[in-house]
C-alpha cells in the first residue's frame, strides 16, 4: 500500500481503483450520461474564491457544530450509499463505527446491505434515509423500525424514483440482482484481495427489505423493490411522512429554490441540496449552485446541507460561508472503505478535519460560526 503517501482524498480514490474490480469502481464513480452534472459539481465549487482576513487570533480553532440535539465534530455528514458491502465485507457497519468514533452523522440507506437494527446497535446516532414506496405500508414499516431503534433523523431522498442513466454500469452489465458474468469474474480475478474479502461476507442483499420478500412473489427482491419506487410522490406524501415520524425530517435531492420554500412551509427541519453526485439527471445544477440561489436569510430558518464533489476542507469552508449547515460526502468515504475498511473511513474523516482546521486558520476564523459571505468572491470568468 501507499502508506504514508495517502495524504488526500484523491490518493484514496487511486487506491480504491487499484483494489476494486473495474465494474465496481465504475459503479462507485458512476455518473449519468455525459457526466456534466458531476463535473459541474466540482467546477461550481472552483468558481468561488476565498478572501482571508488577517490578524484574527486563530491559536485555537473550533470545528464543532450542533445538529438538532446532536453535537458533531465538524459540519460533515456521511451520505447514504446503497449496498456498501460490495466495497468491503463489513460495509455499512464499518462506516457506522467510523462515524460514531469521530462524532459525525452517518445516514444509512434504505438500500443498505446490513439491516438497520444491526447498524443502530453499532451506532445509535445513525440517521436513516428513506425511499418512499408505492405501497405506503412498506414505507410505514421502515419508519416504524427506525422509531423502534430510537432513530432521531429521517432523510427522505426525492431524486431517485427513476434510475439515472449510468452508462458505465449498462456497458459492464451490472444489474441487480447481481449475476456474475465472465467479464465480472475476469475483473474480480485481477483483484484477489477484494475477491477474498468479498467471499468472507454473506451474499449481498437488500437487508432492510427482507420483510417484503413475501410480496416479491416470484420476482427477485431487487426487482420488486425497484418496481415499488413511487414516481407519483407529491408534497401530500411529504405531509404524511412528516406526520408519521416523531423526530427530525430532512428532504434530500432538492435543487429548485421554490422547493426549499415549500419544504420550509411544510415544516420539515432541513434539506440536502443535491444532484445525487451527478448520478441522476445529467446537466442538473449542483447543490452548491442551488445554495446560492436561495432567498437571503432562508438558511436561518431551515438547515440547508449540500453535497456533490466535496473533497477538500476549502469546499466545506465555501459552503459554510454561503450559509450551509454542513456538507454530505458520498464517494470519499467509499474510497476509504474500499482501501482499508473502517480505518480507511476514519482516515478520510481525519483528512477532511485536518484540512478544515488548517483552512479555518488560514482564512482567519476561530470557529465555523464565524464563516460568512464576506469571505468569498465569485471568480471572474
Ligand atoms: C449514492 N447516493 C445515494 N443517495 C441516497 O439517498 N440513497 C442511496 O442509496 C444512494 N446510493 C449511492 C450509492 C453510491 C455508490 C454513491 C456514490 C452515491 C448519493 C449520495 O448520497 C450523495 O448524494 C452523493 O454521493 C454525493 O456526491 P459525492 O460526495 O459522491 O460527490
Image (spheres, rainbow, N blue to C red):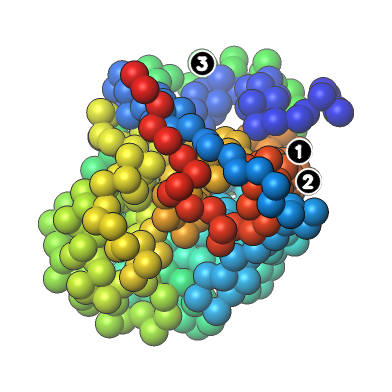
Question: Residue at horizontal 24%, vertical 56%?
Answer: 295
- Cα–Cα gap, marks 2 and 3: 31 Å
Say which of 17 and 88 sits in front. Answer: 17
Occupied quadrant, residue 124:
bottom right
* Above or below: residue 227 compared with residue 164: below
Residue 178, given in percent of the width and then of the height, sits at 46, 35
Residue 20, given in percent of the width and then of the height, sits at 63, 26
Which residue is at the far front? 55
Question: Residue at horizontal 39%, vertical 59%?
Answer: 304
**Quarter of the N terminus within the rendering:** top right
Ligand 1 within 8 angstroms of badge 1 C-beta: no
**Quarter of the C terminus within the rendering:** top left
Say which of 246 and 54 sits in front. Answer: 54
**Mark 2 sits on what residue?**
343
Q: Which mark is residue 183?
A: 3
Give the mark nearest the N terminus, 2 or 3.
Answer: 3
**Mark 1 sits on what residue?**
340
Give the mark nearest the N terminus, 3 or 1.
Answer: 3
* Above or below: residue 77 compared with residue 200: below
- The reply to whether residue 186 is visible in this rendering is yes
Q: Is residue 176 left or right of residue 20?
A: left
Q: Residues within 10 Å of mark 2 (few under 14, many from 20)?
A: some
Occupied quadrant, residue 5:
top right
SS type, badge 1 = helix
Residue 312, given in percent of the width and then of the height, sits at 60, 36
SS type, badge 3 = helix
Marks 2 and 1: in contact by CB < 8 Å?
A: yes
Single out the mark in the foreground, 2 or 3. 2
Question: Residue at horizontal 70%, vertical 31%?
Answer: 8
Q: Residues within 10 Å of mark 1 (few under 14, many from 20)?
A: some
Amino acid at each position: 500500500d501507499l502508506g504514508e503517501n495517502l495524504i488526500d482524498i484523491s490518493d484514496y480514490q487511486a487506491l480504491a481503483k487499484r483494489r476494486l474490480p473495474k465494474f465496481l469502481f465504475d459503479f462507485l464513480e458512476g455518473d449519468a450520461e455525459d457526466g456534466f452534472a458531476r463535473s459541474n459539481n466540482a467546477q461550481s465549487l472552483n468558481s468561488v474564491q476565498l478572501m482571508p482576513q488577517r490578524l484574527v487570533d486563530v491559536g485555537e480553532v473550533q470545528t464543532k457544530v450542533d445538529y438538532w440535539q446532536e453535537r458533531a465534530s465538524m459540519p460533515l455528514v456521511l451520505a447514504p450509499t446503497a449496498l456498501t458491502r460490495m466495497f468491503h465485507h463489513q460495509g455499512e457497519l464499518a462506516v457506522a463505527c467510523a462515524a460514531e468514533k469521530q462524532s459525525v452523522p452517518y445516514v444509512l440507506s434504505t438500500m443498505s446491505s446490513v439491516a438497520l437494527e444491526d447498524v443502530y446497535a453499532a451506532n445509535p446516532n445513525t440517521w436513516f434515509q428513506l425511499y418512499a414506496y408505492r405501497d405506503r405500508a412498506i414505507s410505514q414499516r421502515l419508519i416504524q423500525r427506525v422509531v423502534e431503534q430510537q432513530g432521531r433523523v429521517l432523510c427522505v431522498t426525492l431524486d431517485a424514483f427513476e434510475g439515472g442513466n449510468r452508462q458505465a454500469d449498462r456497458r459492464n452489465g451490472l444489474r441487480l440482482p447481481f449475476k456474475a458474468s465472465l467479464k465480472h469474474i475476469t475483473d474480480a480475478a485481477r483483484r484477489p484481495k477484494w475477491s477474498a474479502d468479498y467471499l468472507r461476507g454473506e451474499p449481498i442483499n437488500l437487508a432492510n427489505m427482507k420483510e417484503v420478500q413475501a410480496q416479491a412473489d416470484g420476482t427477485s427482491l431487487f426487482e420488486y423493490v425497484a418496481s415499488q419506487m413511487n414516481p407519483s410522490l407529491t408534497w401530500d406524501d411529504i405531509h404524511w411522512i412528516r406526520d408519521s415520524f416523531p423526530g427530525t425530517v430532512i428532504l434530500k435531492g432538492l435543487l429548485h429554490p421554490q422547493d426549499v420554500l415549500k419544504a420550509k412551509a411544510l415544516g420539515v427541519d432541513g434539506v440536502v441540496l443535491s444532484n445525487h453526485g451527478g448520478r441522476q439527471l445529467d446537466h442538473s445544477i449542483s447543490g452548491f449552485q442551488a445554495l446560492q440561489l436561495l432567498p437571503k436569510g432562508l438558511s436561518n430558518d431551515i438547515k440547508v446541507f449540500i453535497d456533490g464533489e466535496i473533497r477538500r476542507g476549502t469546499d466545506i469552508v465555501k459552503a459554510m460561508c454561503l450559509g450551509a449547515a454542513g456538507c454530505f460526502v458520498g464517494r470519499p468515504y467509499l474510497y476509504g472503505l474500499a482501501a482499508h475498511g473502517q480505518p480507511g473511513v476514519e482516515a478520510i474523516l481525519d483528512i477532511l478535519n485536518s484540512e478544515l482546521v488548517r483552512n479555518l486558520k488560514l482564512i482567519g476564523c476561530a470557529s465555523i460560526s464565524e464563516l460568512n459571505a464576506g469571505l468569498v468572491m465569485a471568480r471572474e470568468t
